[in-house]
Amino acid sequence: MQHATYGSELLGRTLAGAESGDESPLTHMAVIPTRTAEFSEWPDWVHPEVRDAFTDHGLRRPWRHQIEAADHAYAGRHVCVCTGTASGKSLAYQLPILTTFAQDPNATALYLSPTKALGADQLRATAQIIAGVPSLSHLQPSAYDGDTDSELRQWARMHSRWIFTNPDMLHVGICSSHAKWRQFFAKLKYIVVDECHHYRGVFGSHTALVLQRTLRIARRYGADPVVIGASATVSNPAQALSRLIGDDVVAVTDDTSPHGERTVAMWEPGFVEGTTDTERGGENGAPVRRSAGAEAARLLADFVVEGARTLCFVRSRRGVEVTAVKARQLLAESAPELVDRVAAYRAGYLADDRRRLERALSDGELLGVATTNALELGVDISGLDAVVVAGYPGTVASFWQQAGRAGRRGEGSLVVMVARDDPLDTYLVHHPDALLERPVEATVTDPTNPYVLGPHLLCAATEFPISDAEATGWHADEVIAGLVDDGKLKRRKAGWYPAPGLDPHGDIDIRGGIGGQVLIVDATTSRLLGTVDTSRAMTSVFPGAVYLHQGESFVVDELALDDGLALAHPEEPDWTTTAREVSEVVVDRVVEQRSFGPLTVSFAEVTVTSQVVGFLRKALTGEILDQVPLDLPEHQLSTRAVMYTVEPDALVAAGIAPDKFPGALHAAEHAAIGMLGLVATCDRWDIGGLSTDLHPQTGLPTVFVYDGFPGGAGFAERGHEAFDDWIAATDEAVSSCACTSGCPSCVQSPKCGNGNEPLDKEHAIKLLRLIGRHYGS
């Protein structure tokens, strides 16, 4: 057994190997002590054969939180078990479901996960438990997802009692043809929503409506299923699952599982040598830090040399491939016998390749794996010694989910969080309590968003006519009236019916796209690479854009919006691209407004008109190569924004002269967008912003931060609710940054439409402090 200081010793050996003379990248180290288990007895209601199946697999005594959640579910209460990684949440739903199956051979169950890898892992675990249990031989658990061929899908529909799927396939493959699934729905006893903290933003809003439609179908066929949610630690888990299913939920949150001592380290890469000179570096001569991916590759290689089984989480698919290649290159120089024991893992691989990599990591054949968040969720990989998190993953819940992959043998482990050149990452490595001591966020969803709700109402109407009570329950009266005006719904005595010929299911992209789709095609082979919704096409697949698909790199040649088509060719450029756009914001309706002297803070419905006018080519080191002009049409987005105005006299009194207004507002806007993820479960790419020293409607210096999705996604609303915490953290992030006049770690934005000009870090700090003084006063 490894001794207690394993994590800190491993970290110490890595730091000792760093180049001498460099400032230490370690900004903080904390040790989370061992936690001992609290056990419970098997409940009397558990079927003896089910209990014996678990004890035969080595589970002699369950933990208390597992039984508490299972008791709720078996008693017919919707429940969310919200405990840490490796805390055995699966047992909470396996016990009541398998016991019900043993008692009622006609019962059925549905399991939902956000990723195929997790669904396959849980299916495998279930199959192992029930193997050789006579009362469960009829169960035939089966996958029903994009990897399942059509013959197996048909067999599963006819014979399986327990279907393992995802929200996408539930929507388009099951709900859309519910009459064929009538027998399954009529006997549906349980729906498992695994990793339900993952359902946030527009994806969460879509999933909520898919779940509510699924429950509606089951009830129409005479069933009344119990929903069991499993989640990493999130704040108010009962409320989060309740919002997904539209019903009351009880929560089980006291984690009684054991875990070994865990060392958590915060790591800030140093500046690239020479980039503090104005001739080199990033935009407007800003210094550039070494990339989080390059640092993560070095840590991955170091840990593998030390014999530590390591998982390295990287945010992008391309980043995963680059990190794995770089780690293998480093090993080729120092320990060539270990090169083949490092691999990459991400979504997009063929199912067989994914399973092979999962097995190789579990049995120790692989020592190091670079992965996207595809391995963040519940895939059971035991015995890892270290986790490297390359870039804050966007939420505290995701960070702990990734960190929890280490130390699954109950022994010492190490977690290293490597900061990207980004305001939020920089803030967290210098304010570790904001990550390590902070309660996790509430997931943000808004199922009443009319742009999400409208298409789902059409689907619901084609499944069964919508009654008055259902319309009220969905807060849908206004949206239904619009659909009636458009001729898509018809009112009859029994409710609202779809117009003839309506086939709406295929028009919805559950993963977040709203509106029309643009197909991205490899022009050299006519292969479909992927799709992007129209609202995002102009900023992601503009002519000249670098587009990444499953580790392959393409350059876009043509974007034909009228045809819904983007043509690209394979190319591996040594640069990346970022759209540059100009925009204006019109306030349509102020939903809520509060004034504090010269400061007014509002939450509003807005229309954003934007136009991509060019793109920036940036070397992989972060240095700017050139800016290329583009001529693309304007795009309008109806969304929601948090906004604030400040009286000019107050700005002047705070030491901000009128000629400094634009730079101060612009820099404060960028920094606030970078920091919104601290209070809302979002990424800066989900959000847009605009600042102006004289807005035509307010007549004042004004800053907007808005959701980048039609109808909004709930992020701006969360920013409005937590405005004081958000602005205080933004002030702290900007004022504590070590740069002199602004860099990507504080006020520069990788997506700025104005080439990060003008930006004034010094006066942005004065503005943020002015807001902080007046807000709430």
Image (cartoon, rainbow, N blue to C red):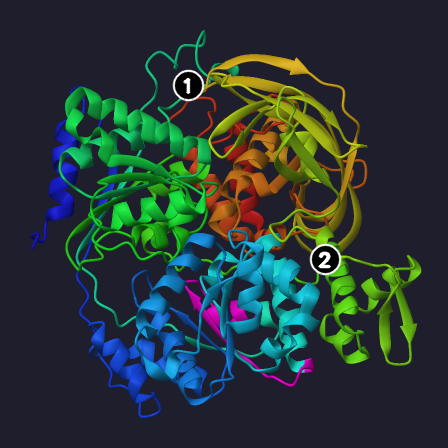
Q: Secondary structure at mark 1?
A: loop
Residue 598 location in percent, x, y? 66, 45
Q: Quadrant of the C terminus?
A: bottom right
Q: Residue furthest top?
A: 279
Residue range in magenta is 220-243
Q: Residue at x 65, y 58 (%)?
A: 172
Q: Residues under labels 1 and 2: Cα distance? A: 43 Å
Q: Is 153 included in the stretch rendered in magenta?
A: no
Amino acid type, mark 1: Thr
Q: Which of the two residues, 326 or 260, is positioned nearer the viewer here?
A: 326
Q: Is residue 225 magenta?
A: yes
Residue 437 % position (x, y): 33, 56
Q: Is residue 484 visible?
A: yes
Q: Which residue is mark 1?
A: 621
Splitting the image into 4 quarters, where does residue 546 fall? top right
Which residue is rendered at x = 31% and y = 72% of the image? 129
Above or below, comparing residue 573 to residue 563 in the picture: above
* Left-right relation of 651 to 773: right
Which kind of residue does numbered mark 2 sit on?
A: His
Count residues near mark 2 (Cα–Cα under 10 Å), then give few for <14, some for 14-19, many for 20+: some
Residue depicted at x 31% and y 92%: 44
Q: Which residue is mark 2?
A: 505
Relative vertical location of residue 659 with respect to residue 411 in this rendering, above or below: above
x then y, percent, for residue 456: 72, 61
* Quarter of the view holding residue 503: bottom right
Query: Upstream in the sequence, badge 1 or badge 2?
Result: 2
- Residue lying at the far bottom in this picture: please name it: 44
Q: Are marks 1 and 2 in contact (CB under 8 Å)?
A: no
